[in-house]
Amino acid sequence: IRPSISYTSLNNLQSILNRSDNNAKDTLSLVLHLLETLPSEMQAILTSSYPSRLSAIHDNSNKPNTFRFASWNLRQLTNDKVQNPGVREVICRVILENNFSLIGIQEIGNKESLDSIAQELNNPTIPSIKNWPNRRHGKWRSTTSDVSGEILQGTEYLGFLYDESIGIEFKKASLLPFKTYFNQLPYITIFRIFNKLELVFVNIHLTTKKSDEDKTSEKKDEAKSLSVLAQAMKNTIEQKHVIIFGDFNNVPTASEFDSLVKCNYSYVIQQNTNISLKEPQGSVCVDNIWLSEEAKNLNTGNTGVIRDNLTNFWIPNGWTLGGLVSDHCPIWMEFNLS
């Protein structure tokens, strides 16, 4: 039986297209309104009808004491954005395809936004996620900071998605009170992994301060402040396995990170991490994962940058569709706690 669009739906669609307020002019709002006018059967077909290349699904089930960690700047993941089924599908698909168990997120626009992703992973509504081949039923949770700072688009939060079912236990979290050094406060979170070891993850987003004079030097100053952060980790917490990660807005070889290297931290990602439809291979490495000397010993050497399947028909691209979920690629690494 082919689902049909009712006269009521057509009338609703016409009224939406004829609206002249700001919401109707916003492509994201318009996409959601258009979907709402369709019958549920048609919504299900359309939200999973966009063809994409199926990447190899990575399975860590035969690797005991091993898990994959990822970092992703999701570019203002607001409540409105996460209601777009194309956005949820891309995020969930990347997580499932690459067998990520712990993901740190930057640029969260609303405190509740990550809950929608965790809910979709636990109880899928999108057909492609619901019918994922050999989908393991995880127990996904999220934790989100208080307001970390302000960016051009508004308020920013930092957060994590994690799968309790594989043995990742949330212990505690807090924003670090380093306003003197950082525009966005770092979000430190401690997870106990496989009931073996507590790892400290410091989620960070470095940005330039609002200055009309020399934004570059302001950014460099903030990067240099990472040494203060590293020293604070060394002096105030008992755990030694520290992972400082996120969007650093600068290449890892820049001199501003020398102070972090002097604290025996090393970076993992060397490839470009930005992405656009015009430049799908990116141009610069701004996202990274820095490991303390102890954390480095847990690195299996399996790392990467995900570039496939980051678009969806229902994601706006200016005034058209088929856009990217973010202008940052997810980056990842693998830990082994044997």
Image (cartoon, rainbow, N blue to C red):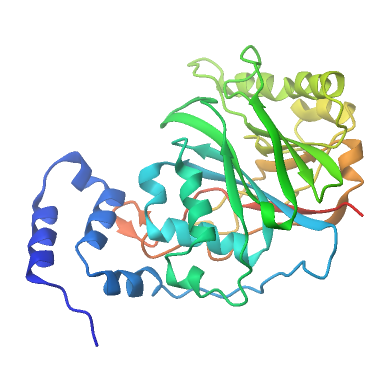
Res. 10 image quadrant: bottom left
Question: Taking 227 as reference, is 240 above or below it?
Answer: below
| Residue 12 seen | yes
Give the image location of residue 218, x and y in percent: 61, 19
- Asked whether 324 or 332 is in front, the reply is 332
Give the image location of residue 300, x and y in percent: 87, 56
Q: How many marks?
A: 0
Side of 113 where 6 appears, left or right: left
- Asked whether 268 or 1 is in front, the reply is 1
Question: Taking 9 as reference, is 259 above or below it?
Answer: above
Instruction: Pick out the residue farthest to the bottom.
Output: 1
Give the image location of residue 51, x and y in percent: 45, 75
Side of 311 where 10 appears, left or right: left
Which residue is at 11% across, 44% downward? Answer: 20
Which residue is at 49% across, 31% downward? Answer: 156
Side of 303 where 323 appears, left or right: left
Res. 322 image quadrant: bottom left
Which residue is at 57% across, 44% downward? Answer: 142
- Asked whether 58 or 40 is in front, the reply is 40
- Asked whether 305 or 191 is in front, the reply is 191
Question: Taking 153 as reference, is 38 above or below it?
Answer: below
Give the image location of residue 120, x and y in percent: 48, 58
Instruction: Pick out the residue farthest to the top.
Output: 180
Query: Quadrant where the C terminus lies?
Result: bottom right
Which residue is at 61% across, 49% downward? Answer: 283
Query: Quadrant where the N terminus lies?
Result: bottom left
| Residue 302 seen | no
